[in-house]
Amino acid sequence: AACRSEEGAKFAASAVDDVAPEASIPRLPACDLADLRSVGAFGASLRALGRPVEALILNAGIDGAPLERTPQGHERHFAVNYLGHFALWQATRDLVHAAEGGSRVVSVTSSAAVDAELVLDDLDWERRPFSRRGAYAASKACNVLFAEELARREGAATAAVVANAVDPGPTATQIVRYSLPQRAAQRLTMTP
């Protein structure tokens, strides 16, 4: 499991172990999607294992964050919700293609994507007034476009990789920690 912190990775491994004690979960470095160097290092570690990837689920996300720049200078929603996922796909595509019997790439999006006003020459919000909701919606629309294009390319090439975009609806996650901190605190006590 890719997690942005070692603590998160331990929690995820424990959750998997609870339902599938026979699972083999390798120790990998943190994968901070806001830092493309971190994504690259994670991808290199995963490739070093040499295991095929049968399912790549691109599900990390932030919503409602203030305007912040990543180490590479990208707007944080765009970086975490889209660029980091795209970089992870690029770093693991050979492993995804190596899965016997095919594989899946699932890009988690949001119904907010339908409200997006994509300004393709300013996805990093450098030349227009910043909007937290607009940045989130645009990043999730990018996920839909990525899944559609990946499905088109993979379907035309081999059909060994199936790509989908999914909207999970309301979930018991911390995605609202910036915009609704009280709800985020409440969600800590919820069962997913």
Image (spheres, rainbow, N blue to C red):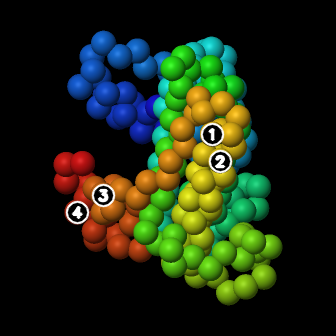
Q: Earlier in the sequence, mark 4 or mark 1?
A: 1
Q: CA distance from mark 2 to mark 1?
A: 5 Å
> Of callouts 1 and 3, which one flags the residue occurring earlier in the amino acid sequence?
1
Closer to the chain start, of discs 2 and 4, is 2
Whole-angstrom CA distance, mark 1 to mark 3, is 30 Å
Judging by the rendered image, the residue that carries numbered circle 3 is 171
Horizontal side of residue 42 vs 127, given as left or right: left
Q: CA distance from mark 2 to mark 4?
A: 40 Å
Q: Are marks 2 and 1 in contact (CB under 8 Å)?
A: yes
The residue lying furthest to the bottom in this view is 129
Given residues 95 and 13, the one toward you in this image is 95
Residue receiving disc 2: 152
Left or right, residue 71 beside residue 172: right
Q: Amino acid at mark 4?
A: Gln
Q: Is residue 144 left or right of residue 63?
A: right
Q: Residue furthest front?
A: 156
Residue 170 shows which numbered tag?
none
Q: Whole-percent x and y of residue 86?
A: 66, 47
Q: Are marks 4 and 3 in contact (CB under 8 Å)?
A: no
Q: Which quadrant of the view contains residue 184?
A: bottom left
The foreground one among 171 and 4 is 171
Q: For mark 1, what is the residue? A: 155
